[in-house]
Structures are given as C-alpha cells and as structure tokens.
Amino acid sequence: MYQRRAMHPLSRSLKPLARETIETLWTIFVAIGEHWSLEDQPTGYRLRFETFLENRTNLNPVYEGYYVDGAAYFESLTADIGPAAALERLFAQKPRVVQSGIPATRLEAVQRFVVNEFISLRLALGGFKSFGAINYRGYFGGANTDGEPTPYRER
C-alpha cells in the first residue's frame, strides 16, 4: 500500500537549502567525528545526512531557518576566530544544565537545533561503534537472514 510522504503544509512553499548551506552543515557534521575521535568514515553518510536535512524541513519548516542561521553563524565564527575555535565553541561551550524553552542566545539555538541533532544522527548512523557498542537506537545493521548471524547481536 502506498503511503504519501509526510510534509508540513508550510513546507510546500520552502525552497531547498542552498548548496553552500548544506556544505557548511556537512563540515560541522564531519567535524563531530574528528572532535570525538570517532573511527567511522562519514563519506558513506552523505546521502542520509542530506535526506535528514530535507526531512526535518519538510516536517517542521522552522528548521530551514535553524539550518540557514546555523551555517551563517558557523561561517561568521570561522571568519572571526578560525575554524578550529569555531567548532570548539559549537561543540564544547555549553551550559552545565541542558536548557529548555526558547533558546536565550544564537549559540544556544545553533547548538540545540543543529549541532546536538547532528551529533545524535552521527552516532545513530554508526559512530556509536567507536565506543565498542554493537547496537544503537535507530541503527539497522543488516538483513535478518535465515542461517546468518543476527545483525544486532554478537555471537
């Protein structure tokens, strides 16, 4: 049975994210692995990453603004303090207590709605294996074929 694609009514009028925005966001996504010494290779995640961005904006059009602003903020930080310091600020300069409600600063908004979600995506796509785990919520390790080892359990 065919199921139509889920889409917020306001998302129909949105233009796709600009290629430059996607490239900047991809830079942040790749840097997650470098920052936390993940051993996975992100190149295989590119299509799923772009699909993730598209799905987020289709389901909640406010994400288009978060992604555009997140990319612009990162570019601005990079111009001011350099790429390494900009990434360090995005990844490490966080409050001790997780904030809720409306973000108080631009940095907090980018961290919460862009960076933290990219970190979760990176772990779910395979980065979790760097920590010795064999399964992670949302990860599908392969087909469950009769006579083959179960893809999500060690034997």
Image: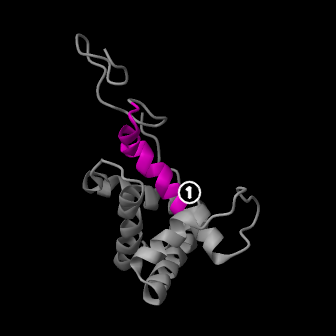
Q: Amino acid at mark 1?
A: Leu
Position of residue 110 measured from the top left corner of the image (x, y, whole percent): 58, 70
Q: Nearer the viewer, residue 120 or 146?
A: 120
Q: Is residue 35 above or below residue 155?
A: below
Residue 128 vs 78, above or below: the answer is: above
List x then y, in percent, for residue 138.
Answer: 46, 37
Q: Which residues are magenta?
A: 115-133
> What element does badge 1 sit on?
helix
Horizontal and vertical percent position of residue 22: 38, 71
Specify the quadrant of the image occupied by residue 94: bottom right
Residue assigned mark 1? 59
Quarter of the picture holding the N terminus: top left
Of all residues, the one furthest to the top in this rendering is: 147
The answer to whether any part of residue 66 appears in the image is: yes
Q: Residues within 10 Å of mark 1 (few under 14, many from 20)?
A: some
The answer, for residue 61, to whether it is visible in the render is: no
> Which residue corresponds to the image point at 61% horizontal and 74% vertical from the top-left?
107
Q: Is residue 117 magenta?
A: yes
Asked whether 154 or 131 is in front, the reply is 131
- The residue under the point 47% across, 46% down is 4
In the image, what residue occupies the spot 46% across and 71% down?
87
Direction bottom: furthest residue = 80
**Is 59 placed above or below 2 here?**
below
Q: Quadrant of the C terminus?
A: top left
Image point 23% across, 15% down: which residue?
Answer: 148
User: In screen coordinates, is 146 left or right of 26?
Assistant: left
- Main secondary-structure element of the magenta-colored stretch: helix
Q: Is residue 131 magenta?
A: yes
Residue 20 appears at what percent x and percent y? 36, 79
